[in-house]
Each structure stands twice: as C-alpha cells, then as structure tokens.
Image: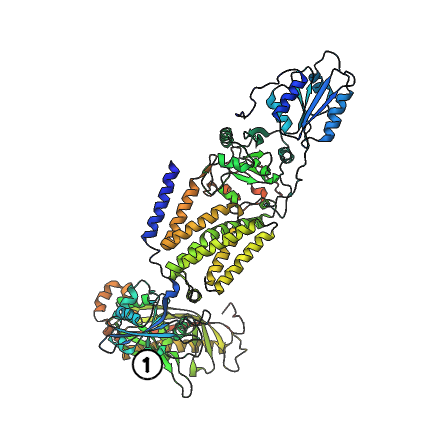
Amino acid sequence: MRWKRKAAALLESALIALSFSGCFSYHELENMTIVTAVAVDEGQNGKLYHLSFECLNMSSGGEEGQQGTQPVILESEGNSIFDGVRNALTEASQKLYFSDCQEVILSRKIAQKGIRKVLNWFLSDAETRVTLRFVVSEEPTAAELLNQKQKTAQTPAFEISGALEEAYTDSLACLPLKLYEINNVLSEEGDSLTLPGIRVEKEPGKPSWIRLGRTAVFRDDRLIGWLPENQVPYFLFVRNRVQNGLIVPGSRMPGVTFEIVESKTDLDFSLSGSVPSAELHIKSQVTADELATGQENGDLNSPAFSELEKNARNTVEAGVESVVRYVQQTFGVDIFGFGCKISKKYPSEWKKLSKNWDGTFRRMKCRADAEIKVRNTSKLVERDAAQ
Amino acid sequence: MSSPNGFGDARLPSDRLEENVRYIGNLFAGDDTLQVRTLSSPSDPAARFVLVYIDGMVNNKLLNEDVIRPLLQHRFKKGESLTAAVAQSVTLADSAECTDQVEKIVQGIVYGDTVLFAEGCADAVVMNTKGWKMRSITEPESERVLRGPREGFNESLLTNLTMLHRKLRTPDLKMRYMTFGRRTRTKACVCYLNSVVNRGALEELQRRLKKINIDGVLDTNYLVEEIRDSPYSAVKTVGVTERPDVVAGKLLEGRVALFLDGTPDVLTVPHLFVEHFQSDEDYYLNFMFASIGRFLRILAFTLSTSTPAIYIAMVNFHQEMLPTPLLISISSARRGVPFPTALEITFMLIVFEMLRESGARMPGIMGQTLSIVGALVVGQAAVDAKLVSAPIIIIVALTGITGLMVPRLKGYVILHRFALLFFSCVLGLYGYLLGELALLAGLFGMSSFGVPIMADTYAHTAQDYKDLYYRVPWKDMILRPQFLSRNKVRQTGGGRAK
C-alpha cells in the first residue's frame, strides 16, 4: 500500500536526519564565553603575541550582565593570533565566542611591525564579523585599556565601540574603519591607512578613563606617526567622510559655531605638468548654532551674516590646505586617497604615476574652495528664498 | 439503503387484524414503549381498528384529535376498503400512506408515525403524528459571532432544512434525501443550488456516499471519515458548521451541503485550506476590520507552527543572528538549567497541550482561560525551580495562544509544530526550511472533491485576491471563486452610488 511506503520513507528520513548532523553539533548559549573586545600586544616568553580578551561576566545575573560589573579579562600568548585564541582555553573553561566582539585594540609596537598578519585571522574566521572595528592604543600597551574602570556603567569594549559610532555620525573626531574597509584600503594602490587612536586620560586624584585620541597614520601596514586631533576634521573633509560635526572658526570669529548638516567634497585633478594638482570643491550646508554677541537675533540677510559665511569658508579652506601640507611634509603618505581617485579617473596616467606615488604625492599642489551655505540659525528663522 | 437487517420485500401476513397485530408485536417484542390501542367504529361494529405507535415519539394531541376522533366519528360505508377510506377521507393527519410493506411500517413506527391496522385489510395506514421534545434553537457554542444571526442548527433534520429554506427561498435549492447506517437508518439530506453548484464535486460526493456501508451513523464525522480525500491527513478537506447562514453562504458559492438527522453539524464540500481562516462574521463586520482579523489569523497560524522551531534554530545553531543584548539575557537566563534547549521546549509544549486539553472539557468558557493561566503559572513555577529557562515560557505561551486563534486547524497545528521543531533541532534553520517545504508540498498536493485545496493561493487574476488575505467590500465582489463554480457572476453592477 502506498501509505505504508510513505510512512516508511518518513521514518527512515527521520532516523537519517538524527544521525546526520545538528543534534550533535549544536552549542548551547550558556556554554560559550562571549568576547566583546580583543587587545593585541607583543608577547613575552618568546611568543609573538599576547592577547587579552574582555569577556562578559555572566555570573551576576541577567540584567546586570552588561553593565555595572567588572568584565572578565582573559589573557593568553601565542605565536599567531589563532594560536593565542586557542591557548585561551587553558584559562577559560569554555570556548570563546567572537560574533559579538566589538573591536580589536592594537598596541603601538604591533602596529609598527605591521598589521596584515593580525588582520588575517579576523578576516578569515567564520565567527568574527567583517564589520569589526580596529583601533590603535596610544598607551604603551593595548591591554591596559581594557583594565580601566569606566565613568559610565559600560565595559571598555562597549565604551569604545559607542564612542566610535558616535564619532562617525555626530562629530569629526576620527574615521572609524571596519575590518573590510581596512582590507580594501590595504589592497588598493594610492591609498594609505589611518586608524583611530585610543588613550587613557589621567587626572590626579581621580580614576583614569578612556577617550578617543589622535589618528594613527600608516605607511602600507606599518604605523609611522600620529595626526593631531585638531587636524582630523579637515582630514575628514578631504576624504568626503563628513556627516555631521561642527566648524568652529576659532579666533577668527570668537563665539561662533556652525553645525554641519550636509557636506560633499568633490576632487578634481589636473595631470598636466610634472606633478598633478588637486582641487577640492567642498559644498556644505550648515546651521549657525552659536552666534557672536550682538548677532543672536541677527537678520540672515544682513551683510554681517555674509561676513560670517565668508569667515567660515576661509576657515575650512585654510584648514584643509594646511592638513594636506602637514601630511605631505610630516608623513609623506597619501592618506587622502588621491592616488586611488586618479587611478580610477585616469588609469593610463596612473600607470606612470604609481611607480613613485609617495614621492609624487609630496610634491602635489592642492587648492581648496569651499561653499558654505548657512541654512538658518537655531532660532528657526528661515532664509529668504531670493538669497 | 437496503441492508441485510432490513425487511426487504416482506409483506403483512394476512388480512386478519389479530394476525397482523401479533406479527408486528413480535417484531417489537421486548420493547415496552410500543403501545397498542384497539377501537371500533360506533357506526359499524364490524369495523375494528388497531393503532400501533411508540409512546413518547408521537404527539398525543395530534393522535387524539386528528386520528382517533375522526375515526370514531366517521360513518363507514359497507363494502369499502377500510384502510383506503381512512387514508383518503377520515384521518386529519397531513401524511397518510397505505402500504403493506413491513419495512415501511416498521420505519414509520420507530420514527413517530402511527400505524393503523383494520379488520379485513392486508395493508396498513401509516400516518404522520411525529412529536417529540427537541432542543430549542440556540446560538452554537463554538461559532460565536459579534454580529449576525444567532441561530444554530439543532438535532432535527427537518428543522435544519427549514432554517436553510428560509434563507434560500428559491426552487433552485434542491434537497435529496438519503439514508445511512444499517441499524440506525439515519436520514440525511444533500442540498445544493442547481444553477450554481460545482457539478463535479456533487457527482463525486454522491458517488462516495453510495459506497458507504456502515453499521450506524451518529454524527457527520462518521460520514466525513468515509468520504474525505486524504483520510490520514490532519488537514480538513470537508467543512463543518453549525450555522445556517454559513451553509447558505457556501451554497451560494457553489458548494454542496450534507445534513444528517440527529446532529447539528452540517458538512460542506469542497473545502479549501483558506476556509480555515475565514470566519462568518468576516462578512457581517466592516471590511477593514474583517481584513485585519483575517490577516491576524494567518499570522497566528504561521507563528504557532514556526515559533518553537525558529527559536531552537536561532539559539542552538545560529547564535550570530541574535542581537547582543538578547544573546546576553538568554544566556544568563539559561545559567543553571540542567536540560538542553530542545528538551526544554518539547517538555513545556507537551505540558501546555496537556493543560489545554484538560481545560477543554470543563464546562463554560472558564475552562479555556483556566487552562491557559494554569499553564503559565506552572511554567513560572518551573522557572523558579530552575527546571526550565524563562524565555521558554514566553515562547510556549506565544505558541499556545496563537494556536487558539485558529481553532479549526488545531490538530494540524499541533502535529506540525512538533514536526518542524524536530527538523529544526536536527538541522537548524536549514532543517526548518526543509520541513516547511515538505509541509507546503503536502498541502499543495491535496485536493477536496476535485478542487485543489490551495487553489486560492496561486491567484491568476486580481479577482482571486479579493477574498483571500483580506476581504474587499461587497460591492467589489463581483465574481464567484472561479474554480468552485462555472456560474461565475455573483452580482452585476453592485450597489454602487453613482
């Protein structure tokens, strides 16, 4: 009878399914140690790497698990990253689980030696995500960042990742790159890597805490220097990675702050002559959030306001040109991606230029022109349509 | 339905009154409710009669006034056949038949007719005096509506057919009697609208009904299991309802209805899968509200079968798909729990089903509520005792409560919930998808009396969507579902305001 055959087939498939897989290769959640951050240092005792893992402390119960308790820090040494991860099992009672890892902190020495070997395992392992963020520690070691007690109730891993997220969307403090973006930059010609730096602030009498610091500059995959914090916003302008942030003209116009609503930078190159030259066209829309005294109720159409705009323009143009010059003179690596853009726009010329791109980059001339449009002030006063 | 225990072609033995009466009495020996009343007409002492009936089945008033009184008052002429005279001119009963077939006489007696034997006649008169106590027409318990008619069928075939007649006052409505059951001789009726019905389904139904040869039929479910497609499947391919307006609606769409004496459940064929999600008040409430209700029911069905399976797949195999805070809270909730997740879920689902079943037979609606609340309380206690983890209780509660939203698919949902859970435990999300594919393949292969049960879901034209996941206003429902009936046009023009 047909139904007997069907029933037999069903039973058989159930038995096969049981022995196939699954039932024996499942992992229970509570048998995993969830790693939230990894710090990579140089190893002692002859090993290449010393890894520190910040893991969630589960024993204190559900709601408080993430905040309010000191996380568990596991340490291990190994000759490769994977080796270090596996050696952590000597300290941990369970396997480490990396899918929730927020970021990887590299120490200065490791960064100076070259980060490609470090990136390799994180890129290829199935558990680690390619959206992992990488930062460089400005302190001598990376591990001490994980040992800080935080001002807020979050663990260092979530602090740093939160700060990086905020930095990307709300301020111009750094350019947080994810693993796949780092990989892209490293494999492209004509572009050099930068990573955000993290440092520890100490004040006498108070506990120390973590904050975002200068931006690390790399030649290929080796750390060569640091870009000062006040140059970083203009660096972001050149790279067209400005989402939201502030332009503070500073001493030019005391008391004035512009909040960037939208910004776009276009790069134009002209390759005539012995060295190429770049022209940056910056178009931004800003709102004037803080105005100098006497102008709070200012009329947007008044000449005093256009004076404001002109000053903002000058600030940005000067800042951008100065950061390019600074990088050319101090580091001599193209962290702005000029080479990359030239290779895409003028591929045949690029073949010649790419041979000594760094040298050519140092001699490039760069001009910026910014168009800053003040949409309104924070008092909801709308601009005349005619303007 | 002729049967081995029927009387076939047996006739009354003689034309002598005492012999006939004794013959019938012997058939009913041991049945003390059989009453025998002898009378003789005052005008002609030779005209002697015997009335045989079963006490309680007859309406005594009818018997007294419409049968006995005219009998005693009539002046019989000499030489005429007594039974013929009684049947033609004496009795006031609305149905009187002269017959000498034992089969008809016995059937009449057992169903509340009175049989009159006369001296010198080889046949008897069967008169309709039926009258017994019946449950009054009430709202069916399992098919409550907020708005709409509150009538429900009761156990009398004739009352039920009357209720249907009142809704479809057209000679197009055909009703064919049939009998089932060798011992119960239960009467049934097949109803349909002649100009609209799906001929194929009707013929198929009649063909299958003719093949039934069973001892007794007490409820339509006996018939269902004999005639349905896919007899071993949990999916209903024959619809059941207790409401006359539902039956009328289904007849208007081209389906066939089967009534059975003694039960308020009426069958409708063919039955599509989407009918499980339709509720009659969909048509009595505002179409927006009804559409939301229907959408929720489909969603509830999906959730009820899939939730435990997806939870297991996520938590045991695909942890990287969970957001970090959820991961942390589930992980810490599971600290100290001894059993693996698969075992926990299976155990709690079984406990929930047990509690629900035990509450189902409790009188009143309190039973259902009590059992659900009981399940949650027991679950909470289990969590406190660290036997199961807290997220499991939520999953099981969600599964159970959504399962109650589509009560007609209860058996199907429970069975396949466990099947999908098993597949998911074994192969993760991949297993769940394979299991789901297998279920769907099974569903799409089923048909009900010639109509594929999932016919609606692969709509060919926009018309077919009008009553599927939502219900459009009546003025837009111009055509009938195509596969159900050839006679497509339901209304022309519609009551549109110009």
Position of residue A363 relative to residue B111, above or below, is below
Quarter where residue B498 is shown: top right
Residue B415 coordinates in the image, percent (x, y): 45, 48
Rendered location of residue A165, percent (x, y) = 40, 71
**Does A208 sit above or below residue B91?**
below
Where's the N terminus of chain A, which quadrant? top left
Relative to A365, is B211 on the left or the right? Answer: right
The amino acid at mark 1 is Glu
Along the line of sight, the residue nearer the viewer: B205 or B299: B205
Between A366 and A127, which is closer to the camera in this rendering?
A127
Q: Is residue B439 left or right of residue B72?
A: left
What residue occupies the far bottom of the structure in this picture?
Answer: A204
**Which color scheme did the rendering employ for the protein?**
rainbow
Toward the viewer: A14 or A84?
A: A14
Query: Can residue B98 be seen in this snapshot?
Result: no
Asked whether, in this view, residue B211 is left or right of residue B109, the answer is: left
Residue B361 visible in the displayed image = yes
- Chain letter belonging to callout 1: A
**Residue B487 horizontal/vertical position (percent):** 53, 33
Residue beneath disc 1: A139
* Residue A222, placed above or below residue B150: below
- In the rendered view, tell whether residue A255 sits above or below residue B198: below
Dot 1, how many residues are within 10 Å of its Cα: few (below 14), some (14-19), or many (20+)?
some
**Picture quadrant where residue A331 is located:** bottom left
